[in-house]
Amino acid sequence: MLPSIETAQPAPAAARWDGRLTKLIFWFISASWQATTDSAHAVISRLTGHLVVLALAAGAVVLSGVTLAAPSSLNQMARPALPDASRAALKTAAPLDLRADLALSGRVGQPWRMQEEGNLVRAALPLTEIPSRLRRAVITYTVEPGDTVQGIAILFSIKPETIMWSNSAIEDAPDYLRIGQQVVIIPIDGVYHTVAKSDTLEGIAKKYKVGTEAITGVSFNNLQPPDYRIEPGMKLIVAGGEKPYVPKVVTSYAGPVPEGARGTGRFQWPTLGTLTQVYWWGHRALDIATATGVPVYAADGGFVSFAGWTDVGYGRLIVIDHANGYATYYAHLNSFNVIAGQSVQRGQLIGTVGSTGNSSGPHVHFEIRYNHSLLNPRLYLP
């Protein structure tokens, strides 16, 4: 009879079977020493056969203890190993990446299919990036309320100068856009040139400070080698070409300078409002939009060198000479509160906001010049 085994706490299956097997073997060895007859040897042979069967059964139980390990342990073993950097990225990623991290552990389903590359696991994102593509032709844009040259340039990813040099009306008045106006938009930065009778490729290239390949190498021009023939009236894109800037000039006061009329070199804002256009190559000023009739003040002390109407797009204009090389321009005014030759102090009322000349709405076109060169006013204002 096999001895019984009693334990206070249940032992693992493999351990219990190992103990029973050891005691069983010990019992068979003791019985073999006591057997002295042929019948005894026969009994041992039969018992040995049973022992083999029992040993095989015990081995199967031991093996099943390994394969039937806890599911959490198995999942930890089967989970792909990720580099520390990748694991940290997954833990701090967006909720979609968190779901992907859970899917790796087998805790949730995998609605997003995973793509494995070695030890790295990439979660597919439900976003599509559409690359920007080069426009294939010259187009026209219709001006809408609130449009500026800078805003249109940003919309089409080109420089505002390109819009100026493609539209003569805008080149003459870059801060004057009319609702419904048609604006030519070329696909690359440069100049849009209309061929005249006397034009040659070399002459056009020299005019815009580029080589002839900047014209012949542009596919939009459809020029055919080897002569690259051009005809009057043709429209050519001059890639990277540029035009010289020509500042507007008004007749200045030529009388005696009032005594003590000199600026401090420190400027203040001429009025309060919204910046609708800032300084750039074709618009070397600030446009400050506000309501008609809002006061306009002298940015610094000096004397009025011009106060009147202009025919160069400024409309009603005041120019203050600060007698230190600086001069300030206040354009598109509605009314004047000063006259030419008058001395003014910093912050003094000089006029009111209007929309005269080439203006698409009430604002002050404000310039700062030094020895006739136009500066960026934003660099001189508080």
Image (tube, helix red, strand yellow):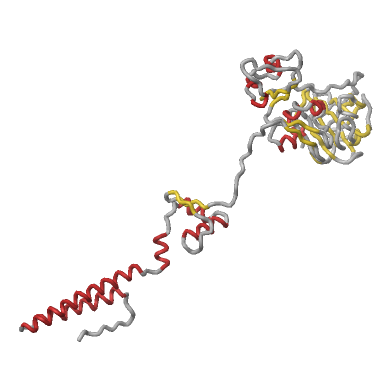
Q: Residue at x 25, y 85 (%)?
A: 4
Q: Residue at x 53, y 56 (%)?
A: 112
Q: Residue at x 6, y 82 (%)?
A: 38
Left or right of 168, for residue 200: left
Write down the quadrant of residue 214 in the picture: top right
- Name the outermost residue toward the top: 198
Q: Nearer the viewer, residue 58 or 359?
A: 58
Q: Quadrant of the C terminus?
A: top right
Residue 131 image point, x, y percent: 61, 40
Left or right of 250, for residue 163: left
Residue 262 image point, x, y percent: 85, 26
Residue 18, compared with residue 144, is above or below; it is: below
Residue 312, compared with residue 347, is above or below; it is: above
Q: Quadrant of the N terminus?
A: bottom left
Left or right of 346, for residue 26: left
- State how many labels appear: 0
- Name the outermost residue toward the left: 37
- Name the outermost residue toward the bottom: 1
Residue 280, compared with residue 71, is above or below; it is: above
Q: Nearer the viewer, residue 31 or 320?
A: 31
Write down the quadrant of residue 282 in the picture: top right
Residue 308 image point, x, y percent: 92, 26
Q: Nearer the viewer, residue 209 or 51?
A: 51
Residue 351 image point, x, y percent: 91, 34
